[in-house]
Image: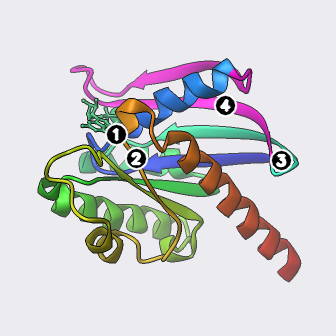
């Protein structure tokens, strides 16, 4: 089965860090197909899209999973739309820093708008929320962030992506949620 999973979140939340760590974890287990691809989107080299494909058996199912990050910058709306096309599941990487409260929220709203244009409803989409940067001194407490950033009431993972903490757990949880959602849809049909 083929799946497409997109990591979204404000710029600097840790999306690239997640993807790079995940790639090296899975590569070591021979569970990647090809390289980690980095696409430069701006001349100043600060904006990137990363992508790789994992060939993996999870929950007894052979999966080919395409993983992508989407840039946080609002002016990249068209690019974000292209990346989101055909997405099966989303990881919302939240920067735990209190300073990033507003921008985290705006990115969630922007993502909802992108999905809506595609005829999808973010609130009915398979999502995992990752509270990243738990090591920061101004990291907000989880209960507060749950109220702000998890309207789905879905699984969340506490992460320190630079140390690789929570990275694999986040990935496995989103795959699981996508499979559950697909299974539920199949039964309805
Ligand atoms: N303190 C801390 N910094 C992190 C963590 N994860 C990522 N970073 C740093 O945050 C910055 C932005 O990370 P990046 O993955 O490029 O964010 P992106 O813009 O969402 O792709 C980088 O300097 C990372 O090293 C974390 O868990 N804790
Ligand atoms: Mg990045």
Say which quadrant the C terminus sits in.
bottom right
- Residue beneath label 2, please? 159
* Residue 50 vs residue 96, the one in the foreground: 96
As measured in the structure, the alpha-carbon distance from the residue carrying label 4 to the one carrying label 2 is 22 Å
- The residue carrying mark 1 is 14
Q: CA distance from mark 1 to mark 4?
A: 19 Å
Q: Which-is-in-front pick, marks 3 and 1?
A: 1
Image x and y of residue 180, in percent: 74, 67
In depth, the one of 32 and 66 nearer the eye is 32
Structural crowding at the residue carrying mark 3, measured as other residues with C-alpha within 10 Å and reported as few (<14), some (14–19) or many (≥20): few
**Which range is magenta?**
29-58
Q: Earlier in the sequence, mark 3 or mark 1?
A: 3
The answer to whether residue 162 of the structure is visible from this angle is: yes
Q: Mark 4 sits on what residue?
A: 53
Q: Is residue 143 magenta?
A: no
Disc 1 beta carbon < 8 A from ligand 1?
A: yes
Q: How is the image coloured?
A: rainbow
* Badge 2 residue CB within 8 Å of ligand 1: yes
Is tag 4's residue or tag 3's residue first in the polypeptide sequence?
Answer: 3
Q: Answer left or right for 56 relative to 121.
A: right
Task: Look at the numbered disc 4 and give the secondary structure of its residue.
Answer: strand
In the picture, the disc for residue 1 is 3
**Callout in the foreground (4, 2):** 2
Residue located at (57% from left, 51% from top): 85
Circle 1/circle 2 CB separation < 8 Å: yes
Where residue 89 appears, x then y in whole percent?
60, 57
Q: CA distance from mark 3 to mark 1?
A: 28 Å
**Mark sitting earlier along the chain (1/2):** 1
Query: Distance from label 4 to label 3 (Cα)?
Result: 13 Å
Whichever of callouts 4 and 2 sits on the residue coming sooner in the sequence is: 4
* Separation of residues labelled 2 and 3 (CA atoms): 28 Å
């Amino acid at each position: 089965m083929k799946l497409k999973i997109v990591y979204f979140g404000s710029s600097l939340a840790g999306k690239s860090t997640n993807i790079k760590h995940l790639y090296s974890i899975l590569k070591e287990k021979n569970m990647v197909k090809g390289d980690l691809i980095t696409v430069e989107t701006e001349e100043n080299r600060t904006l990137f899209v990363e992508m790789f494909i994992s060939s993996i058996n999870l929950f007894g199912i052979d999966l080919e999973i395409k993983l992508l990050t989407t840039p946080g910058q609002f002016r990249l709306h068209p690019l974000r739309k292209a990346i989101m096309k055909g997405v099966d599941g989303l990881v919302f990487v939240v920067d735990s820093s209190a300073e990033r409260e507003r921008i985290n929220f705006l990115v969630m709203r922007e993502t909802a708008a992108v999905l809506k244009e595609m005829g999808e409803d973010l609130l009915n989409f398979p999502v995992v929320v990752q509270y990243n940067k738990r090591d920061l001194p101004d990291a907000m407490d989880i209960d507060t962030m749950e109220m702000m950033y998890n309207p789905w009431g879905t699984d969340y993972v506490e992460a320190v992506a630079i140390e690789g903490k929570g990275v694999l757990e986040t990935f496995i949880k989103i795959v699981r949620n996508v499979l559950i959602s697909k299974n539920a849809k199949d039964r309805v049909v």
